[in-house]
Amino acid sequence: MRPYHLLWLAAALIAPPAIRAATAPWDTFSVLRDRDTIAARFEAMPEAELKTLYLHCSAEADRRLLDIGEAAVCSIAYEALKRRIFGGDFEALLAWWRAQPRLPR
């Protein structure tokens, strides 16, 4: 996985669809192929950045249907957040998520 992929993801989740389509570094197969590398990057990401990424994924999924690559990356971020920050406790993650202000639409 190239280093700019994570930067692209953060920007892509708030970018217009045309920009996402033109700059997407992942397709469905590359996300599956690079899953372990992506997961390792998320595991090493600072807590605040991982939480922000997850909240952006959540907000974007509220706005539109994520494509399969975006959904896979967001799922990997969710798993890293749940495991690393919340010790695998889904209920704790859910309570934290519910307490967060919603990002503007």
Image: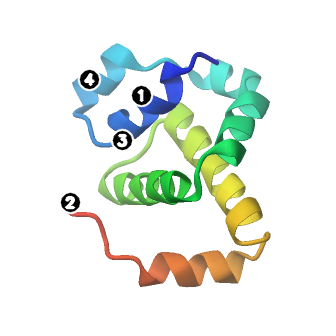
Relative image position of residue 14 (x, y in whole percent): 28, 42
Query: Badge 2 is on which residue?
Result: 105
Residue 22 drawn above or below residue 87: above
Relative image position of residue 102 (x, y in whole percent): 31, 71
Alpha carbon separation for disc pair 4 and 1: 10 Å
Q: Earlier in the sequence, mark 1 or mark 3?
A: 1
Q: Earlier in the sequence, mark 3 or mark 4?
A: 3
Q: Which mark is residue 13?
A: 3
Q: How crowded is the residue under tag 2: few (<14 C-alpha within 10 Å), some, or many (20+)?
A: few
Query: Badge 4 is on which residue?
Result: 19
Query: Badge 1 is on which residue?
Result: 8
Relative image position of residue 90 (x, y in whole percent): 70, 75
Residue 70 drawn above or below residue 101: above
Amino acid marked by disc 3: Leu
Residue 82 drawn above or below residue 53: below
Q: Earlier in the sequence, mark 4 or mark 1?
A: 1
Label 3 near label 1: C-beta < 8 Å? no
Alpha carbon separation for disc pair 2 and 1: 20 Å
